[in-house]
Amino acid sequence: MGTKCVYMHRWWVLVFVLPLLLQGCLVDRKQRGTEIDPLLLAQLQPGLSTKGDVLRVLGVPTRHAVIQDREAWIYDYSLEEHWVLFLGLYNEKRKTLQQRGVAVLFADNRLYDYWFME
């Protein structure tokens, strides 16, 4: 009878302690794009700077668009957090911590203007 009691005790330990050990979470942060420093933009001068100058200073844009009938290069940036929780059940949560960008507008292959987007 003593051996049977020890095995029952171990079984209950597995039932109650093992789920506590399996609880936890994973956190993953993802950065998409490049955050543009306003000091870099200060190096560019509307009417004088060319597309080549913009590429040299800011790098390759995330996407292209047309804004106010002008060619625009968009530099997007976002910081996202992804949580996966294992608390007996599976739970997932995504949250955007930061999202912003810069639109650089051109006229005749020269910098026309730039805007910060939040």
Image (cartoon, helix red, strand yellow):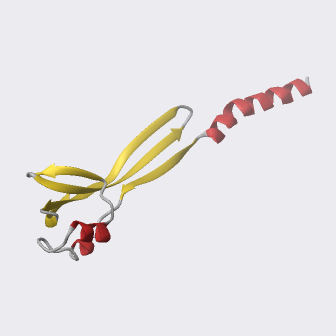
Tell me residue 117's x, y (percent): 20, 56
Is residue 45 among what the camera can see?
Answer: yes
- Hey, which residue is sitting farthest front in the picture? 108
Please give the name of the residue rendered at 79% of the width and 32% of the height, measured from the top-left corner: 10
Answer with the quarter of the image where residue 112 lies: bottom left
Q: Nearer the viewer, residue 45 or 79?
A: 45
The quarter holding residue 42 reads bottom left
- 13 on left or right of 97: right
Name the foreground residue: 42 vs 89: 42
Residue lying at 39% horizontally and 43% vertically, measured from the top left: 94
Give x and y (percent) for residue 44: 20, 74
Identified at 70% across, 29% down, the residue is 15
What quarter of the picture does the N terminus occupy?
top right
Drawn side of residue 22 relative to residue 116, left or right: right
Residue drawn 44% across and 46% down? 82
Q: How many marks?
A: 0
